[in-house]
Image (spheres, rainbow, N blue to C red):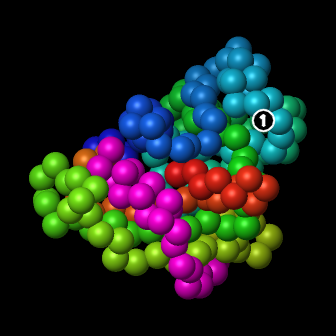
Amino acid sequence: MVCENKNTTNTVLEAAGLPTPKNAIISDVDGVDLALKSIGGKFPVIIKLLSGSQGIGVSQVDSYESLVSVLQTLWKASGNNEVLLQEKVPADGDIRIQVLSRKFFSPDEESSEIVAAMKRTSAKKDFRTNYSIGGGVKRIKLTNEMMEIAKGAAKAVDCAWCAVDLIVDKETKKPYI
């Protein structure tokens, strides 16, 4: 249930000490400046609906004017006022890691295994990497740090089988969930 809401997921992952991009919730135009400042104040930024899958409900915004306009459109169309604003981590795609636990209830890192992983690249003329919208996939060798983060994320959200998406900052090489 934690993973049904992107803000709840981020809150749980942060509380577990796991690396996530800076993020903030915005519920109206009056909150834009504070939210933008809290994530670093730089464009581009990522906007995410709190629920969604396959990249639907995720947008990249390149200016303050566009941010306000896109938010107003989302609020009018969705009827839900809360939207997640996230810093854009500079990266070349992302990494999808499948984690499976041998313990169905209360999985832990010791009982968890990485059963699959792939590097995902963006679709043509899109920044999103979802295969369902035209993104590409290829093999990847995971680092120990990536594996530990993925297992830690599965444990934090109490999930026996889950996909953990990592984005690796191409400047700092730091992975984020």
The residue at 13%/59% (across/down) is 104
Which secondary structure lies at badge 1? helix
Q: Which residue is at the front of the view, 48 or 142?
A: 142
The residue at 61%/42% (across/down) is 21
The residue to which callout 1 is attached is 67
Res 131 visible: no
The residue at 16%/66% (across/down) is 102
What amino acid type should be assigned to the residue bearing mark 1? Answer: Leu
Residue 166 located left or right of residue 44:
left
Work out which residue is located at the far front of the displayed protein and give it.
144
Location of residue 173 by image quarter: bottom right
Q: Position of residue 54 (x, y in %)?
A: 52, 63
Question: Quarter holding the N terminus?
Answer: top left
For residue 148: magenta? yes
Tell me if residue 139 comes above or below residue 18 in the rendering: below
Q: Position of residue 35 (x, y in %)?
A: 68, 24
The residue at 47%/65% (across/down) is 144
How crowded is the residue under tag 1: few (<14 C-alpha within 10 Å), some, or many (20+)?
Answer: many
Tell me if residue 87 comes above or below residue 138 in the rendering: above
Q: Position of residue 175 (x, y in %)?
A: 60, 55
Magenta range is: 134-156
Residue 80 located left or right of residue 63:
left
Q: Which residue is at the front of the view, 107 or 79?
A: 107
Res 64 visible: yes
Q: Position of residue 158 (x, y in %)?
A: 25, 48
